[in-house]
Image (tube, helix red, strand yellow):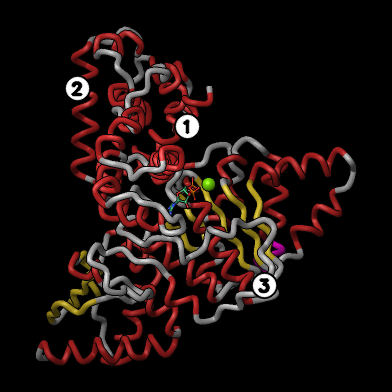
Amino acid sequence: MASGDYDIIWKETMNQIREELGEQEFAMWFNLEYLDASENELTIGVPSTFYQDQVRQRYQLYIENKIRELIGKNLPINFIVNTRQMEKAPALPAGSEKTSTSTMTKSVSSTNKESKKPHSQLREDYTFNTYVIGDNNHFAANAALAVALNPGTTAYNPLLIYGGVGLGKTHLMQAIGNEIHKKSENKIIYITAETFTNEFIQAVRENNTATFKNKYRFVDILLIDDIHFLQNKKETQEELFNTFNALYDANKQMVFTCDRPVSELKDFNDRLQNRVGRGLNVDLQIPKYETRFAILKKKIEPYNINISDEVIELISRNISTNIRDLESALNKLVAYTDIIKKPVTLEIAQEQLRDNFMSPKQSNLSIEIIQREVADYYGLSLGDLKGKKRTQRIVFPRQLAMYISRKLTDYSTIEIGQSFGGRDHATVIHSCDKIEGIIRADPKVESKIQNIMNIIKTHGVKS
Ligand code: ADP
Ligand code: MG
């Protein structure tokens, strides 16, 4: 066959699939580009490694079967990452943006029924319109939009949004709720896992679980935020498991958020873990500079306020932890201008935000907090982490804890070594090098580590 023939076969396959799956699903998962072919393989480009994983898992066999039906022989597909496709954001109007960020305004606002009363459990400003799409979240945002447009579709049920603190999980989840609320009479419940737990405990105490069950098993859309909170809560997990099954069987949409992939939850009912992870899992990453800039611009829109792009740039460059930190810096300036009634100059911004810009090192964070959190995250004991055992299961968390101690505190390598069962400073340096090497080799690990650091920072501040 000539290579042009393969191109035609590919197009025909895609046409058939589009018909079969519908525009929504197709637009989301078939940002695929025909690159090359030989007698025994098709090479198809995908926009990212995440996409690559998902497409392999979900559609590879399906597409290969389609091709076999067409040409009567097997032609395996090799999906390779082709960053050029990144710019073509899949389902959403990419708009005319220069920074590769956009919001979802166009695709959803056409169906507005503006006059409806807001949903009492949802923040009105957490909508798709105010959610800036960037490199860090476009899959998650697409998935969320797909859910909002077609709730209950098996392929996205449940939707799990995971990622570190302040990266936009709650906003996205509530955007789904707001969008569905605006357009339908669906009964929607938004609840944090913590409140869900408390309500359940109270229901048990008051001998009134029937009311509790009725409340959650007869909704159309159930949004449960921060399910990592359910770790160690055996009875509540069991209850959620039953709720899940009832809703799933009735094709009711569920959305969960979590601060880590479900596979990394500890003390979590296996069957529930399996159910929660069985739909679509999408993650939120830390946004790059352009996206941070775009988010801040978006955040000041509703205020009639004079903050220059220079100042926005300053904040976006200096704060790269998460969006919540970015916003709190902005709010500080907004409050300040409110008082002085003058435009914020670069100097004023520098001065006012000095604390926010300080290095991520936090003086109140102890090595022990870091050790406890890392041990906890990996299901190890503190003794294991500090001890002498050298199994791989322990060595990586141990090295990681040293690396994080180095990153987040001002302790010297000597002091860190001492806190890890009296190791010497060379061991600490070696561990840090090791982790840095791993990060360089696999950028996915970096965001995972960043997530763990975010968890440590929030817990560290609380304790
Ligand atoms: P999480 O639930 O992951 O901790 P939140 O959803 O509470 O994070 O987000 C923290 C803040 O950042 C919120 O004010 C939210 O509106 C804002 N935010 C996060 N992501 C975006 C985004 N892509 N565009 C606009 N605002 C965002
Ligand atoms: Mg949240």
Disc 2 marks which amino acid? His
Q: Is residue 222 above or below residue 337?
A: below
Q: Pointer 3: what residue?
A: 116
Q: CA distance from mark 2 to mark 1?
A: 27 Å
220 versus 169 height, above or below: below
The quarter of the displayed image where residue 319 is located: top left
Q: CA distance from mark 3 to mark 2?
A: 60 Å
Residue 16 pos. (x, y %): 36, 90
The mark that comes first in sequence, 2 or 1, is 2
In this rendering, position of residue 14 left or right of residue 200: left
Image mark for residue 458? 1
Sooner in the amino-acid sequence: mark 3 or mark 2 = 3
Q: Are marks 1 and 3 in contact (CB under 8 Å)?
A: no
Residue 227 visible to the viewer: yes
Residue segment shown in magenta: 245-250
State the mark number for residue 430: 2
From the viewer's perspective, is the residue at label 2 or at label 1 nearer? 1
Q: Which percent across, then down, holds residue 70?
A: 30, 92
